[in-house]
Image: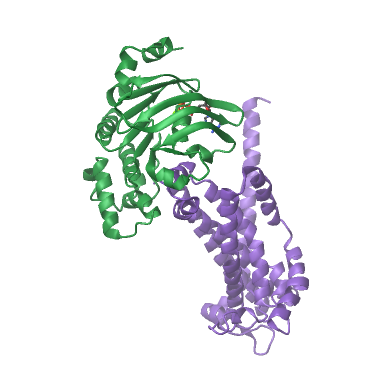
Chain colours: A green, B purple
Amino acid sequence: MMENETKTIEIKDLDFYYGDFQALENVTFDIPENKVTALIGPSGCGKSTFLRTINRMNDLIDGTRVDGDVIVEGDDIYKDEIDVVELRKEVGMVFQEPNPFPKSIYDNIAYGPRAHGITDTEKLDEIVENSLKHAALWDEVDDRLDQSAIGISGGQQQRLCIARALAVDPDILLMDEPTSALDPVATAKIEDLIDDLKEEYTIVIVTHSMQQAARISDYTAFFLMGEVIEHGPTQKIFEKPENQKTEDYITGRFG
Amino acid sequence: MHWKTKEKVVENVLFIFALSSIIFLTGIVIVLFREGLPIFGKVGILEFIFGPEWYPTYDPPGYGILPLIMGSFVVSVGAMILSVPFGVASAIFISYILPKNLKKVVKPVVELLAGVPSVVYGLFGMKILGPFIAKVFGLPTGLTGLTAAIMLGIMALPTIISIAEDAITSVPKSFRDASLALGATRWETIRNVIVPTASSGIVTGIILGMGRAIGETMTVLMVAGGAAIIPEMPSLAKPLAPLLDPLRPMTSTIAAEMGETAVGSPHYHSLFGIAIILFVITLFFNIIADVLSQRFKEKVSGE
Ligand SMILES: Nc1ncnc2c1ncn2[C@@H]1O[C@H](COP(=O)(O)OP(=O)(O)OP(=O)(O)O)[C@@H](O)[C@H]1O
Ligand SMILES: [Mg+2]
């Protein structure tokens, strides 16, 4: 199904547990490079959990356990010798709720590069400008970079968070319902942005909006109760789904 | 009785209790000023505060409380220099490193320490820490400013740890997640995001701890040595100089001398005068702490 694509992320027989509760079961599929892959499925089916296995953010939750392989750019990221900090440099994340730091716009963007040892102000200025331009936010904030990021609008905050993730120069961008807290105008801006970004980044996005998945993604994976029921090119999933459950969900006849 | 009448009764009873506690407190403040102000009239407020000689029972008497203020200041600052690093580090440790189930035990235990009567700390300082300090520094007596500063520092720790820990824990987890997801280490996250965000909360804890140190009486009365002299200036060669002599902070002066003064005498009024100064200082600390914790709330919830 993806003969010509390079696989950036391969997931094999992935099981995930919160304590005794199994949240992911036998998840196996590949995520191709420089494409947008959408994760859809009803609430509680494990989309966010799955997304967090790719940058190991689940490690922060006590009592979790992972079985199976997640291979990112050729490395099994759950092997002992993997440096999580290095992994997260390559795999950026944008959260459902915009979560800028209570710092200036500039310091928000410069945060990641600084953490990775860049101190040269000219270099930082350049990164900040490029990231904000990339996230289509530069024109709106270029005259107030030293203002607190808490004071800008929700849509701007979310683009700021995208810019902040881009500033670290990752290869992969994970987005967990990045537009669910936003109005249609801000949502449209972020969707356009995602379209531009896929030239350079591999994007995995969780969304509850079927229209959004159809509009922006190249591939879609449908999750149900911790399992991937169906996975494939978005067009095929939406027009000729193989599984009845997928069709029910997409057409809104579910449950 | 009709339920509405009942409710009215409850309301009124509560109102009377609330009103009387306010009246009591105001009454105390009024008496404090009535008994203390005459000394300002007698020796002049500036002479009182900045006068270098506290000889209330000599002839002619000296009513300058600068040595006492300096005593309080030196002991409290010394206490803070000790307790702030320990307190903040412990708060970070408890909220970020200690596993949750251990935290459930450690936090209440730390808070319990705040409830240990100060005479117990005093006894420890007098009989164990004091002799130890005398030996280490080769001093004639172990009852010095340093002994008091260490004991007060220990006593301020629970306040600082508890409030700073609350501030650190209330920093939204989403900030931590954002930082870690950007590839920052845990330590970078604590230093660059958590602590700065919690800073006003942490400072509130420090100020309240400092307020506790300045107002503490029993312990300093027991361990500070009680000499009303202006502490020696610190120098590079002797950085601990101000702390190695016996000192007499404001609180212990009041406690030690109140019994031997005749009501209405200048000495009596001057002790109330000291109380006014203490009252103003601690009030000031509490107001700052309040303002800062307000600012902390705004910061976390978004200005
Ligand atoms: N920290 C946690 N501890 C225990 N169980 C959790 C935790 N987080 C999620 N779960 C459980 O794991 C399952 C999958 O949750 P997850 O958040 O991945 O779902 P989701 O598909 O992202 O849902 P939504 O669309 O509502 O965001 C749910 O049953 C949820 O209750
Ligand atoms: Mg989710």
In the displayed structure, A146 sits above or below A98; it is below
Q: B288 and A53: which one is in front?
A: A53
In the displayed structure, B166 sits above or below B49; it is above
Q: B241 and A208: which one is in front?
A: A208
Residue B23 position, x and y percent, is 62, 53
Q: Quadrant of the N terminus of chain A?
A: top left
Looking at the image, residue A185 sits to the left or right of residue A71; the answer is left
Q: B148 and B168: which one is in front?
A: B168
Rendered image quadrant of residue B91: bottom right
Looking at the image, residue A25 sits to the left or right of residue A4; the answer is right
Looking at the image, residue A120 sits to the left or right of residue A18; the answer is left
- Count of numbered tags: 0
Residue positioned 64% across, 41% down in the render: B14
User: Given the current orientation, which residue lies at the most extreme bottom position?
Assistant: B59
In the displayed structure, B176 sits above or below B289; it is above
Residue A58 position, x and y percent, is 51, 37
Residue B218 position, x and y percent, is 72, 67
User: Given the current orientation, which residue lies at the most extreme left position?
Assistant: A139
Q: Can residue A110 be seen by looking at this rendering?
A: yes
User: Given the current orientation, which residue lies at the most extreme front position?
Assistant: A3
Residue positioned 23% across, 50% down in the render: A143
Q: Can residue B255 be seen by looking at this rendering?
A: no
Q: A174 and B68: which one is in front?
A: A174
Rendered image quadrant of residue B7: top right
Rendered image quadrant of residue B117: bottom right
Residue B125 position, x and y percent, is 73, 70
